[in-house]
């Protein structure tokens, strides 16, 4: 299959050193099954899943342990066989307390289902394929965690013309998607085939950044099996090229409207790992119980790409990678720009964990935050063409109406502004805080309006 | 052509707030929030333009023929006060929100030295009727321009964190002074 | 003509004409306003806190006059305001008991352990995005002062990393309640003075690791009260504020010193 280059280039963005050399060429390894798994029931966006098991229950690998709670929700499965030892609130890697099912593993890895589903999946209607995806507990593995079966069910009147498979992996340090594309290209293509059955009239664009020429070649070879309008697109390497809205623009030239969704420009984006999981779920009947992630960082002895079971404690991963090299200054779940700093070593892998960064203690100067000097670097860097300086000041002085007027709700929290700020301001934290305040301001306003009209 | 020069002179070269230092009270009082400032600017433009016209007529058709020029100040204030009250009545009916946010500064246009200043200056310069109105309009437009620019600056300052000694009116006055300095750059543009 | 006469005629006539114009204009541009709304607005405290559920005192007054809203919604106004409003409108009204805010946590820096350094915005909502401000207990007060900043009467102060409400100043407007991301602040009747100052759902041994005054769920207090007044909610003892509780024994017997007496708004009578 031919590789074409993307035609459109968005505004803003940054070009940090991608720091991927350490792990880009390392094959993925699978650690031994950890003794304890902590599986969160709030890995996805939407209502937390309802537990189906209680303390003392025995579970098998792939068995459903939590059910969907409403339409925008997902299912959760046991990553391996063992016994449930705890169902209750625990602090998770996202910084929030959630219901967690702790499973003491027995090392036997006994599966719940040992045969793929009968029949030819290509004859099933899209509705059934989407239901299989739902049953497998698949959520957006690129980081957002939106339940995939909901994303694949746009409301009537919204057609999908462009299906984009996101292999950009633009964040520094992370190489898991890269390895997945090199090692399991066929599996990803199989998943794309399933998506083509669901959206029969859509054109498929597989997007990969140009710093991964081997992945581009691997997918180009494997994609020959696909029929229809399929293209591999080579993207200019930049951060955040892999962000949904930026990706859609690069490939189609359409901008997702403010407050809108990709389906408003007839586009749909799925991460390569999600595409692969879709294929495994529909064709082989396997639920989502493991994922690839990059455990790396200057303070880690042996950085690696790991295929980890969902619920693997971070401490186990760090130990498997040879332990820390000196004191750990900061532990980040995710990438350096969009990840979440951990307040303890007690977090565990979820379906959206793309990496684990172990960083040494930082220089003092990087920590102090000063007032905004209106230098404008952030305005230049913002990929959504917002005014981060004004927004961060509005957030600081709690002027929520100004923040709303300057479209803080369109911020994608990519971290470009924080990266370039010479005053080392905690920009993304300001944005998140402003968003929460603006949303509660809107709720208040709607409640007032209702009161006046009633 | 002369009309354009007249207006440009009044708006930029001899700006009523920043060069002649008239009308500082509403300039500092209404410059906290942009929609309010725009409303105030509009009200002032209406009052000053109409007041220029009516006071000119009053001066040359009533006061001068009756040799009563010395009544200028009182008579002008009467006329201006009537106009301002009229504007207040109209605003209260048409946009109560703006009326509430302008508050006391709306009736204060009456005693605003800029309004009386324009009326008196028209007479002093011995301008004919249409030129008086143009000058009035230019003066008020200059006031509105300075007010809106200053409001934008103050809104930006309100998002910053100045040292305690500078907070509030202190920094506002320093900024006004700097804005005035900036407008000095227009001197010599139009000889008027 | 005599100048004095001229002056008088000119100015007098001008004044009369201007006045006439304004009078006619006022008649056509009249705005209907219910004077009662203004009067009722004057009877309210004028704090515009929003505790009544309306946008401000003027809004509440409008609702009272035009929509017969209940007159006992103003918390800061208290019993006196309810009586005055009831008299003005000729309705019967019973004042709800006055409330006061309390922070259900006692873990200041001398009692609650810290496990990480938090280096971000000094705001509790912002800190909650990363799981807290560095204190090991994930249910306790973060001490970054979001509640203190939103209080319109500065009734909350932060001491050693813990927010404390001064009941004498608190007007029970309720703004601090949604401000706390860990829902630690409650509005309770001011007559209730015994409180379990903890909100942790961790099990006893885990609580002891992170705080010296956290509730360890020993259920002794529940037993002393015979289940009336204090009940268990998961791993936390909770006071039932709907019933009066005046049992000093629970304060003395609590092994973790979690239960305290905090005075209400009225000054205590001398013993």
Image (cartoon, helix red, strand yellow):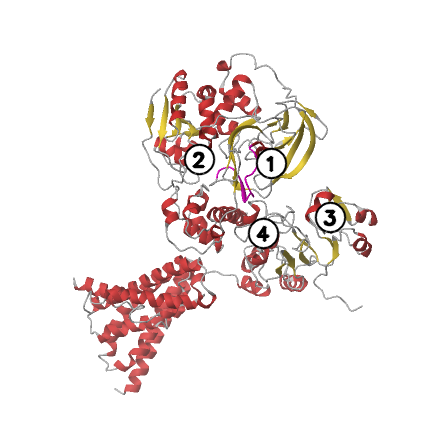
The reply, left or right, for residue A131 in relation to residue C6 is right
Callout 4: SS: helix
In the rendered structure, the answer to whether residue C208 lies left or right of residue A10 reads right
> Residue A324: within the magenta?
yes
Using residue A386 as the reference point, say whether residue A7 is left or right of it. Answer: left
In this orientation, which residue lies closer to the viewer: A124 or A249? A249
Residue under disc 1 on the same chain as residue under disc 4: no
Gap in angstroms between the C-alphas marked 2 and 3: 46 Å
Percent x, y of residue C104: 68, 52
Q: Chain of mark 2?
A: A
Q: Which residue is mark 2?
A: A261
Reading the image, the residue beneath label 3 is C215
Tag 3: Cα neighbours inside 10 Å, few (<14), some, or many (≥20)?
A: many
- Indicate the secondary structure of the residue bearing disc 2: loop
Residue B123 appears in view: yes
Q: Which residues are magenta?
A: A321-335
Give the CA separation, mark 2 to mark 1. Answer: 37 Å
Q: Of circles 1 and 4, which is in front?
A: 1
Residue corresponding to mark 1: A315
User: In terms of secondary structure, what is the magenta stretch mainly?
Assistant: loop
- Please tell me whether mark 3 sits on a helix, a strand or a loop: loop
Quarter of the C terminus of chain C within the rendering: bottom right
């Amino acid at each position: 299959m031919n590789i074409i280059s993307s035609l459109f280039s968005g505004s803003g963005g940054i070009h940090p050193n991608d720091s991927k050399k350490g792990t880009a060429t390392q094959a993925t390894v699978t650690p031994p099954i950890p003794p304890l798994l902590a599986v969160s029931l709030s890995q996805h966006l939407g209502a937390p899943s309802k537990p189906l098991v209680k303390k003392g229950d025995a579970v098998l690998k792939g068995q459903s342990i939590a059910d969907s709670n409403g339409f925008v929700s997902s299912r959760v499965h046991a990553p391996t066989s063992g016994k449930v030892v705890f169902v209750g609130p625990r602090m998770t890697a996202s910084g929030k307390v959630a219901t967690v099912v702790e499973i003491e593993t027995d090392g036997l890895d006994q599966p719940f289902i040992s045969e793929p589903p009968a029949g030819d999946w290509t004859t099933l209607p899209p509705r059934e394929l989407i239901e299989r995806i739902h049953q497998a507990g698949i959520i957006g593995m690129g980081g957002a965690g939106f339940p995939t079966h909901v994303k694949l069910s746009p409301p009537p009147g919204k057609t999908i013309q462009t299906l984009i498979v996101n292999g950009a992996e633009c964040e520094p340090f992370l190489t898991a998607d890269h390895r997945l594309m090199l090692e399991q290209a066929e599996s990803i293509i199989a998943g794309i085939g399933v998506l083509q059955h669901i959206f029969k009239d859509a054109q498929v664009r597989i997007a990969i950044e140009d710093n991964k020429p081997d992945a581009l070649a691997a997918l180009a070879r494997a994609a020959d099996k696909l029929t229809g309008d399929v293209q591999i697109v080579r993207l200019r390497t930049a951060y955040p090229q892999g962000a949904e809205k930026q990706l859609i623009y690069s490939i189609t030239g359409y901008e997702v409207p403010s407050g809108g969704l990709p389906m408003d420009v007839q586009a749909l984006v799925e991460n390569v790992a999600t595409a692969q999981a879709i294929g495994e779920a529909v064709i082989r009947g396997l639920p989502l119980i493991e994922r690839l992630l990059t455990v790396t960082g200057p303070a880690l002895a042996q950085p690696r790409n790991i295929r980890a079971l969902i619920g693997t404690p971070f401490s186990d991963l760090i130990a498997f990678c040879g332990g820390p090299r000196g004191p750990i200054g900061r532990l980040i779940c995710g990438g350096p720009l969009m990840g979440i700093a951990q307040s303890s070593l007690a977090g565990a892998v979820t379906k959206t964990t793309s990496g684990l960064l172990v960083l040494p203690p930082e220089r003092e100067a990087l920590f102090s935050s000063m007032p905004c000097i209106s230098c404008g670097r952030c305005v230049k860097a913002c990929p959504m063409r917002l005014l981060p300086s004004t927004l961060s000041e509005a957030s600081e002085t709690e002027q929520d109406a100004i923040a709303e007027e300057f479209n803080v709700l369109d911020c994608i929290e990519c971290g470009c502004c924080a990266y370039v700020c010479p005053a080392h301001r905690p920009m993304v934290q300001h944005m998140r805080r402003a968003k929460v305040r603006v949303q509660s301001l809107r709720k208040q306003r709607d409640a007032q309006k209702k009161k006046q009209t009633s | 052509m002369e009309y354009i020069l007249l207006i440009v002179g009044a708006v930029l070269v001899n700006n009523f707030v920043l060069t002649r230092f008239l009308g500082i009270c509403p300039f500092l009082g209404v410059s906290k929030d942009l929609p309010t400032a725009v409303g105030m600017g509009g009200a002032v433009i209406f009052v000053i333009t109409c007041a220029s016209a009516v006071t000119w007529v009053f001066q040359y058709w009533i006061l001068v023929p009756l040799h009563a020029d010395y009544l200028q100040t009182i008579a002008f204030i009467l006329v201006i006060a009537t106009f301002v009250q009229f504007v207040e009545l109209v605003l209260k009916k048409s946009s109560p929100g703006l009326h509430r946010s302008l508050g006391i500064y709306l009736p204060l246009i009456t005693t605003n030295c800029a309004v009386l200043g324009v009326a008196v200056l028209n007479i002093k310069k011995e301008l004919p009727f249409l030129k008086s109105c143009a000058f009035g309009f230019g003066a008020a437009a200059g006031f509105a321009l300075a007010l809106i620019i200053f409001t934008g600056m103050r809104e930006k300052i309100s998002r910053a964190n100045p040292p305690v000694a500078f907070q509030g009116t202190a920094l506002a006055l320093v900024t006004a002074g700097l804005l005035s300095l900036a407008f000095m750059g227009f001197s010599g543009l139009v000889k008027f | 003509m005599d100048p004095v006469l001229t002056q008088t005629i000119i100015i007098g006539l001008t004044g009369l004409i201007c006045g006439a114009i304004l009078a006619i204009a006022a008649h056509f541009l009249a705005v209907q306003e219910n004077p009662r709304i203004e009067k009722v607005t004057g009877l309210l405290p004028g704090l515009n806190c929003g505790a009544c559920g309306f946008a401000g005192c003027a809004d509440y007054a409008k609702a009272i006059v035009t929509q017969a809203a209940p007159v006992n919604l103003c918390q800061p106004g208290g019993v006196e305001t309810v009586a005055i409003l009831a008299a003005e409108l000729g309705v019967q009204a019973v004042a709800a008991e006055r409330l006061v805010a309390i922070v259900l946590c006692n873990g200041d820096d001398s009692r609650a352990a810290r496990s990480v350094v938090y280096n971000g915005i000094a705001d509790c909502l912002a800190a909650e995005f990363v799981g807290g401000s560095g204190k090991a207990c994930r249910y306790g007060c973060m001490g970054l002062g979001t509640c203190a900043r939103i209080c319109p009467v500065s009734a909350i102060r932060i001491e050693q990393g813990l927010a404390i409400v001064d009941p004498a100043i608190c007007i029970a407007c309720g703004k601090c309640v949604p401000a706390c991301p860990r829902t630690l602040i409650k509005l309770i009747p001011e007559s209730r003075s015994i409180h379990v100052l903890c909100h942790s759902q961790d099990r006893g041994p885990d609580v002891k690791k992170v705080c010296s005054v956290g509730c360890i769920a020993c259920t002794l207090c529940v037993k002393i009260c015979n289940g009336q007044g204090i009940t268990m909610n998961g791993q936390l003892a909770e006071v039932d504020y709907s019933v009066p509780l005046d049992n000093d024994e629970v304060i003395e017997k609590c092994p973790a010193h979690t239960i305290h007496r905090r005075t209400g708004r009225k000054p205590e009578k001398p013993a």
